[in-house]
Image (spheres, rainbow, N blue to C red):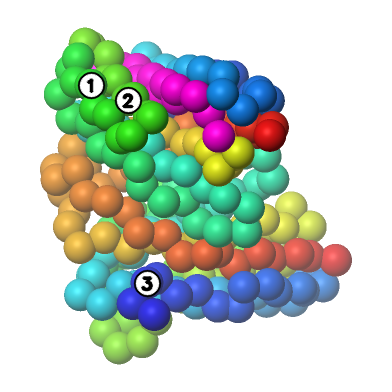
Amino acid sequence: TQLLEQSPQFLSIQEGENLTVYCNSSSVFSSLQWYRQEPGEGPVLLVTVVTGGEVKKLKRLTFQFGDARKDSSLHITAAQPGDTGLYLCAGTSGTYKYIFGTGTRLKVLA
Amino acid sequence: NAGVMQNPRHLVRRRGQEARLRCSPMKGHSHVYWYRQLPEEGLKFMVYLQKENIIDESGMPKERFSAEFPKEGPSILRIQQVVRGDSAAYFCASSPVAGSQAGELFFGEGSRLTVL
C-alpha cells in the first residue's frame, strides 16, 4: 500500500517567517502534486512535478521533487496570512489513482 | 459556473437512512473520482469512474456504498443505511485525462454528510 506522510501535521507561524513542509514515502511516484485546500472548499492544484530532482517556483513557493521520486518538499518564503490552509501532496505511479498525503495545516498569524 | 458541481453541500441523515451525493464534472471531463475526508485529515480515494464504467472501486467499502456515472447526468455516490462513522466530507474531482498523464484533478466544493 502506498502511503504519503506529511510533516509537520500542524504549523503556526508569524507573518514573514519561512517554512518547509515535507512529503515522504517509501514508494516511487511517477509524478507528485501539491494542492492547497481552504476551509469549506475543495483542494486546488498548486504544482505538478514529474522529474527526480525537479525544482519549481511559484512566486514565494518553491517545490522540489526528490532525486529518487519518493519525497517532495514545499518551501514558503515570507509567509503571509493568505497562505493559511491545508497543504496536501498527492502522488501517482503512472495510473489514474492519486494517493493523497496526510496533510499539513498551516496557520500564518498577522 | 464551469467548475465541478456537487450537491447537496450539506446533508443530515439519521442512522439507517440513505444518502445520495451528486457530482457534475467539468464540461468535457469524462473521468470522475470520489474522495472522502475526515476532519483534520487528508483525502482517501474511494472510487474512479469513467462514463458508464467503474474502473476502480478499491477504496470504497463493499457494503452499503455504491457509485455510478451514467451516460447522461451526474455521477452519484450512494450510501445506504448510514452510520455515524460515515459522517465526513465527500469530494468529487474530475479530470480530462487518465492513464499515465499527470493530469490535474479539479475538485468540487464537497458534500458534508452528518449522520445523527
Which quadrant of the figure contains the N terminus of chain A? top left
The residue under the point 67% across, 56% down is B88
Q: Inspect this view and state whether residue B35 appears.
A: yes
- Looking at the rendering, the stretch of residues picked out in magenta corresponds to A69-80
The residue under the point 45% across, 22% down is A77
Q: Is residue A95 above or below residue B63?
A: above
The residue under label 3 is: B3
Find the residue positioned furthest to the top: A67
Query: Are discs 1 and 3 less than 8 Å apart at CB?
Result: no
Q: Is residue B2 magenta?
A: no
Label 1 secondary element: strand
The residue under label 2 is: A63
Q: Are marks 1 and 2 on the same chain?
A: yes
- The chain carrying label 3 is B
Amino acid found under the numbered disc labelled 1: Val
* Lower sequence index among marks 1 and 2: 1
Looking at the rendered image, the disc whose residue lies closer to the viewer, 1 or 3, is: 1
The residue closer to the viewer here, B9 or B50, is: B9
Estimate the x, y position of residue B99 in percent, counting from the top left.
16, 48
Measured in 3D between alpha carbons, the distance from the residue under mark 2 to the one under mark 3, in whole angstroms, is: 26 Å
Amino acid found under the numbered disc labelled 3: Gly
Q: Is residue A76 magenta?
A: yes
Pointer 1 local density, CA inside 10 Å: few below 14, some 14–19, many at least 20: some
Estimate the x, y position of residue A21 in percent, counting from the top left.
49, 21
Amino acid found under the numbered disc labelled 2: Phe
Measured in 3D between alpha carbons, the distance from the residue under mark 1 to the one under mark 3, in whole angstroms, is: 29 Å
Q: Is residue A76 left or right of residue A64?
A: right
